Amino acid sequence: MLFPNIPLYVLTIGGDSRNVGYIMAVYTISAMSIRPAAGWLVDKYSRNLVMIAGILLMCLTCLLYYWADNIAIMTGIRVLHGLVFGLASTAIATIVVDSVPVSRLNEGMGYFGLTSTLSMAVAPVIGFWLVGNFDYNMLFTGITAMTGLAFLSSWLVKRVKIPDVKHNGSGQGLLSHLVEKSALPAAWIMFLLAAVYGALLCYISLYAVERGIDNVGLFFTAIALTMFVTRPIAGRWADSGGANQVLLAGHLVIAAGMFTTGISGTMNGFILAGLLNGIGFGACMPVLQAQAVMRTPIHRRGAATGTFFALFDLGIGLGTILWGYIAAASSYQIMYFSTLIPLALALGLYLRFNLYRAQA
C-alpha cells in the first residue's frame, strides 16, 4: 500500500524527482546494510525471534509516518523502516528456505514469492483508494494495522531446529561470517535486475502522470497477476532441469516489458508492459533466490539469504538514485529505455557465471 504512494507523497510535502529518488533509495540501502548482520543473527540465534522482533519494530515505525511532514523527517523514517524491514524479511525468507526440500527449492521459492505478488496485486489498489477517498493519514493507519496483523501471525510460525555449529563462517574474519560467497554469483545478477525492477516500483506512478494516465494501480495488478501465475510454473520447470531456459527467457521478456513501458502512452500499453514485466521477473526471481541458497549448508542459509537480498536492495537503492537523475535530466521515457543497459549486463553475467552448467 505504501510503496507506490511514496513518490506522490514526497511531491505533496515539497519534494521533486531527485528527492523521490533519494527517499526511495535510502529505504532499500538501509535494508541492504542490515541484511548481512540479520543473516548472521538468524544463523546464530532463533530465526523466529529475529522475525518477531523485526515485525514488531516495523509496526512501531509505521506509526512515525503521521509526523512525516517534510523531506528531512521522511528521509529519517524511511531509513529506520528499511532497517527493520531488512531484519524481518531476512528471517522470514530463511525460515521458508528451511521448510522446503532442496529438490523442490526453485518451486518452493516460487510459491513463497506468491505471497508478495498477491500483496502487490491488491495493496497498491487499496493504497491509492485510501489516499483518493480519505488522505495519507488513513494510508498510514492502514499500513500500521496490516503490520500489526503480521506481528500477531508471526507467533504461529513453526520453529525449525538448526544444527549447533561452532564456526559460522568459511573463514576467520568478520566478512566471512556476514557474507556467504556461494550466493554471490546469483546475487550479483539479482543486483542488476533489481536496478531495473526499481525503476518500475519507484517511478511508474510519476511516469503515468507524465503520460496522462489516471489509474496506474492497474499496472501493478497486471504485473502481480502474471508474477502470480509465472512463479510456480518457472520454479517447477527449473527443478526439472530447465533453469537455463527459465533465466534466459525471463531476461528477454523483461527486455520486451521495459521497452513496452518506454513507448506506452495509453492505459492498455501500461497493462501490456505490466504483464510482460510480471512474466519476466516472475521467472527470474525465484530461480536466482533458490540458486543463492541451494549449495549452502543449513547453518549458513541465513548468511546466504542476507547476501542475496543485500545486493537486491542495493540494486534497487542505487538504481532509484540513478533513474531519478536520468529522469530529471531527460524524461521518464528515456529513463525506462536506459534500463535495458543493466538488463544486458545481467544477461552477460549470467552467461559468464553459467549458474546452472551442472543441469544444462
Image (cartoon, rainbow, N blue to C red):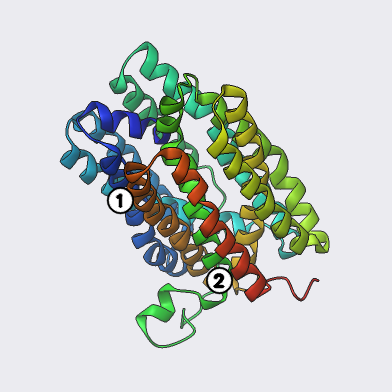
Q: Is residue 2 left or right of residue 80?
A: right
| For residue 234, above or below residue 44 | above
Say which residue appears at 57% left-offset and 44% top-offset: 258
Q: Is residue 203 left or right of residue 355?
A: left
Q: Amino acid at mark 1?
A: Val
| In-front residue for pair 328/80 | 328
| For residue 185, above or below residue 19 | below
Say which residue appears at 46% left-offset and 47% top-offset: 198
Read off the residue under disc 2: 183
Mark 2 or mark 1: whose residue is earlier in sequence: 1
| In-front residue for pair 162/146 | 146
Say which residue appears at 60% left-offset and 60% top-offset: 289
Mark 2 and mark 1: Cα distance apart in space: 24 Å
Q: Residues within 10 Å of mark 1 (few under 14, many from 20)?
A: many
Q: Is residue 334 left or right of residue 265?
A: left
- Judged from this view, the residue extending furthest toward the top is 133
| For residue 186, above or below residue 106 | below
Read off the residue under disc 1: 26
- Judged from this view, the residue extending furthest toward the front is 330
On the image, the x and y values in percent for residue 97 come to 61, 59
Q: Dot 2 lies on which element?
A: helix
Q: Nearer the viewer, mark 2 or mark 1?
A: 1
The quarter of the image holding the N terminus is top left
Task: Locate residue 227: give its quadrant.
Answer: top right
On the image, the x and y values in percent for residue 64 come to 23, 35
Q: Amino acid at mark 2?
A: Ala
Q: Dot 1 lies on which element?
A: helix
